[in-house]
């Protein structure tokens, strides 16, 4: 979601950076087809660039599949360095990919950067919505505005017959947005092409910009920009 949303924002003419704050499981570089080491300018890291946007991730600093086995204070230090020790330059939007939950990464980010807002991503089923509610409550406790909710894996369309199948249910994200009175930013269907393109390191918004799933991401990006404009 973060990768394709960032690419969609770039297509809308925005200067975008992506901070991969999933320190334990960084996946942004692989999905963006960029695994080179970042360079240094003075005492700061230069972000890696691809598809017109800038990125920083722990994956750029690791050797192969080396695990990150850190306690909380180290996670906070990494996020602080990604925030303030990277030459981001002038950006319109910095998209931060967070791990699931309400742990060290989320708290450290809220304490490090004055955030314009959080985007809650959920799938339609009740179990996922329970987790999303905790994320919303966490952002509220640290005074971060909720920009809205995106429903991922909203429905499946058979590529052969075109039939819709609500594998995880449908509409849960929109109902939750209405219940807590926050904007519903859009829904992303369950398309295998999204996964295939991500595995290839070529986000579907870049690889197939006119496709239905790519246009769904662009629609969500337009909604996010609308909410950011209101927030500012």
Image (cartoon, grey):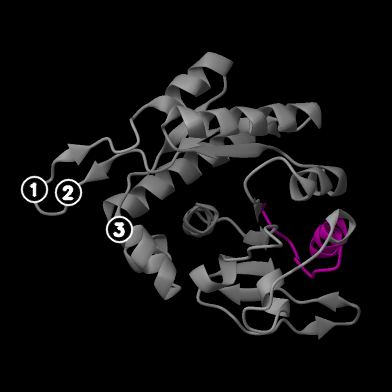
The residue to which callout 2 is attached is 158
First to last magenta residue range: 75-94
Q: Residues within 10 Å of mark 3 (few under 14, many from 20)?
A: some
* Depicted 143 relative to depicted 26: above or below: above
Q: Residues within 10 Å of mark 1 (few under 14, many from 20)?
A: few
- Residue occupying the point 85% across, 64% down: 81
Q: CA distance from mark 1 to mark 2?
A: 6 Å
Quarter the C terminus occupies: top right
Would residue 75 be seen by someone viewing this image from the given angle?
A: yes
Q: Is residue 143 left or right of residue 100?
A: right
Query: Relative to 152, does residue 55 appear above or below in the rendering?
Result: below
- Badges 1 and 2: C-beta atoms under 8 Å apart? yes
Badge number at residue 192: 3
Residue at image mark 1: 161
Residue farthest to the left, as pictured: 161
Q: Measure how far apart labels 3 and 1 are at the Cα level.
A: 15 Å
Inter-mark Cα distance, 3 to 2: 10 Å
Quarter of the image holding residue 14?
bottom right
Residue 76 within the magenta-colored segment of the rendering:
yes
Going from N to C along the chain, the mark reached first, 3 or 1, is 1
Q: Residue at image x 55%, y 70%?
A: 52
Q: Nearer the viewer, residue 192 or 56?
A: 192
Q: Is residue 31 left or right of residue 133?
A: left
Residue 59 percent across, percent down from the top left: 66, 73
Q: Are marks 3 and 1 in contact (CB under 8 Å)?
A: no
């Amino acid at each position: 979601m973060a990768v394709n949303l960032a690419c969609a924002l770039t297509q809308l003419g925005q200067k975008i950076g992506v901070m991969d704050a999933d320190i334990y499981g960084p996946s942004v570089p692989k999905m963006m087809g960029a695994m080179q080491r970042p360079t240094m300018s003075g005492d700061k890291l230069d972000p890696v660039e691809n598809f017109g946007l800038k990125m920083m991730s722990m994956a750029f600093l690791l050797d192969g599949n080396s695990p990150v086995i850190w306690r909380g204070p180290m996670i906070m230090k990494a996020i602080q360095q990604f925030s303030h020790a990277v030459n981001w330059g002038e950006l319109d939007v910095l998209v931060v990919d967070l791990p699931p939950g309400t742990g060290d990464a989320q708290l450290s980010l809220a304490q490090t950067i004055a955030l314009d807002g959080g985007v809650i991503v959920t799938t339609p089923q009740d179990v996922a919505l329970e987790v999303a509610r905790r994320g919303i409550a966490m952002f509220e406790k640290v005074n971060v505005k909720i920009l809205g909710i995106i429903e991922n894996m909203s429905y499946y369309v058979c590529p052969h017959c075109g039939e819709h199948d609500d594998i995880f249910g449908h509409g849960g994200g929109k109902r939750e947005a209405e219940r807590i009175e926050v904007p519903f930013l859009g829904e992303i269907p369950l398309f295998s092409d999204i996964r295939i393109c991500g595995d290839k390191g070529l986000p579907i918004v870049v690889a197939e910009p006119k496709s239905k799933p790519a246009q769904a991401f662009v629609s969500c990006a337009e909604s996010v920009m609308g909410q950011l404009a209101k927030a500012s």
